[in-house]
Amino acid sequence: MADFNRRDFMTAATLVGAGTMVFGAAAAAERYPAIRKAAEAGRDAAIKRIQDWIALPSIAAENRSMKEGAEYMATLAREAGFDTATIVPTDGHPGVFATMDNGAKRTLALYFMYDVKQFDPAEWSSPPLEGRIVDKPGFGRAIVGRGAVNQKGPEATVLAALHAMRAAKAKFPVNLVLVAEGEEEIGSPHFHQIVQRPEVFAALKKAEGIFIPASWQDMNGNVSVNLGSKGVIELELVASGEKWGRGPKGDIHSSQKAAVDSPVWRLVRALDSLVTPDGNTPAIDGWFENVRALTPREKELIAEVARSGSEQEQKKQLGVSHWIDDLPYGQALERLASQPTVNIEGLVSGYTGPGGKTILPGRAVAKLDLRLVPNQTSKEAVSKLRAHLDKRGFNDVEVNVSGGYDPTETAEDSRIIRAELETYKRAGVKASLNPRLAGSWPGAVFTAPPLSLPAGHFGLGHGAGAHAPNEYYVVESTNPKVAGITDAVMGYVDMFHQIAQVR
C-alpha cells in the first residue's frame, strides 16, 4: 500500500521545506492545544498499541491468526471510539466494518488492512514480532517489526488521534466510516464482498472520500499526494509433466534429459514470450490496446518531481545505478507512472539447496505480478494472458490467479486531495502531486462506479522497509523536518478538520 515502501511508489521529491520548523507544530498546538496535550499524554500508550499489534501477525498467505487478527482490529476500532465495529465474513478471510456518527455534516472513510507479509526471522536484526525500538540515523527512534509501516504504524497513529480527541473531549468535525480487510497482501481477492454489503455500501456512499494512512516523509520532510495507483494481478504460472503430457510427472535423474522433455524449460519458454527480449516491456498480445497515455498535466507534474528531486538519492535508496535503457530521470519517472509491467517475483523448481542433486524436475512454478494502468482492467488482463499462452501452444501451463484489482484515479480538484494539500501546507510541509503511485492498493473498489469515491494516501511521519526485513516506523523523530508519532497524530486531527471545512 500500503507501499507500499509497500507498494514501490514513485518518489515524491518536492520543493524545499520550511526552514527548521517542525512542520508547523507550534501552529498546530495553538489550533488544538487540548488535543495535543492529550496526544502527548497518550504517546506511550500509542507506541505500545503499535507494538502489541505487531506481536499478532495475521498473515493471509499462511492462514496465520486471521480470525484473531479480525477480532483484534474490531477491538481496536471500538476502543478508539467507533460506535459499532463488526466482523464481516467473506469467502476468504474476514474484514471489519465500523462507523462513528458524530452528528457532523460530512463523512470521511478510512481504509485499513490488518494482514501483513510473511517473514523469515533469520533475515532480521531483531525479532520481527518484538517491535523493538532502535535508532535510525537521520530520523530518530523507530519501531522495527513486521507491519510497522505497512500498515500497522500509520493505522495505529490514526487510532491514537481518535483517542486523543476523545480524551480532550473535543468535538469531532466529521463522521467516520472504517473498512478493514485481511487479504491485502494476497491481492484482496474478496474485499469487494465487504464493500458491496448493503450496510457498508450505504455508509461509504455518504463519504466525501477515503484515504489509507501513510508515512512517506523523506529525510527532508517531503511528501507526495497521489492522484491514483496502478492496479495489480498476482498469479502463478505452473508447468508440469502431468498437465503437459510430456516430461516426468515427478523428479527423475537428470541423465534422462537426453531422452525426456523438461517442464522447467517449457515454463522458461512461456515466460520468455511474455516480454520483449530485454525483459522490460510486456509482449502479451493486445496488452497495450486500452492503455491510456499520460495527459499533458500528468507530464507536467512528473517534470516538476524530476526537477525538484534527487535522482542520486533515489538510486541509492533503490540500490541501482541505471534506469531502464539508461533513460534520463524525468523519462524514467514517466515510464514508472505510465507503463504496465510483467514482473517475476519468484521462480522455483527442483532442488535449490547446497550442492547439486542432478534431477530433472517434473514441475516448475513462477510467481508473477502484473501492474496495470488506466484504462486496463484485471479481468481483461487475465483473459489476454491466457489467450496469449494458448495461441503459442502453452495450453497446459496453468494460470492460477490469487488476487488483484484495477487501477485507481482521483481528480486533482476533489475535496479529499484539496484537504490533504491544505493540511500539509498548514503543517509547513511542501507536498508534490504525483499522477500515479507505481505500487497498488485495492482502491478501485471505492473509486470505480457505483461508489465513485475520491481516494488517496495521507499522513505525516516516516517509515520504510515494507515487505522487507527490518521494516520500521519512526515514533521519536530527531529530524526537525520529519514528524514523530505525536506530530503525526496531530496531522490526522487537522486532516479531519480540513475535510469538514474545505469547499
Image (spheres, grey):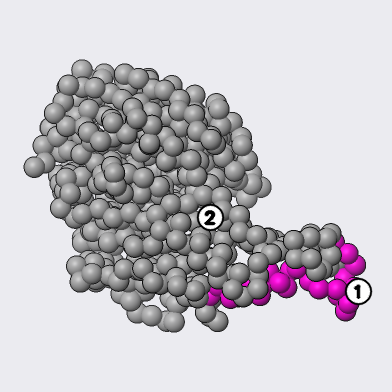
For residue 402, side relative to residue 448 (left or right): right
In this rendering, the answer to whether 24 lies above or below 13 is: above
Local crowd at mark 1 within 10 Å, few (<14), some, or many (≥20)? few
- The magenta region covers 251-275
Three-letter residue code for mark 1: Ser
Residue linked to disc 2? 234
Three-letter residue code for mark 2: Glu
- Relative depth, front residue between 385 and 425: 385
- Residue at image position (36%, 68%) is 290
Residue 99 image position (x, y, % from top left) = 31, 25
- Relative depth, front residue between 406 and 55: 406
- Residue at image position (80%, 69%) is 246
Residue 182 image position (x, y, % from top left) = 49, 37
Residue 181 image position (x, y, % from top left) = 45, 36
**What's the magenta bit mostly, secondary-structure-wise?**
helix
In this rendering, the answer to whether 476 lies above or below 187 is: above
Residue linked to disc 1? 255
Instruction: Place residue 209 in its image quadrant.
Output: top left
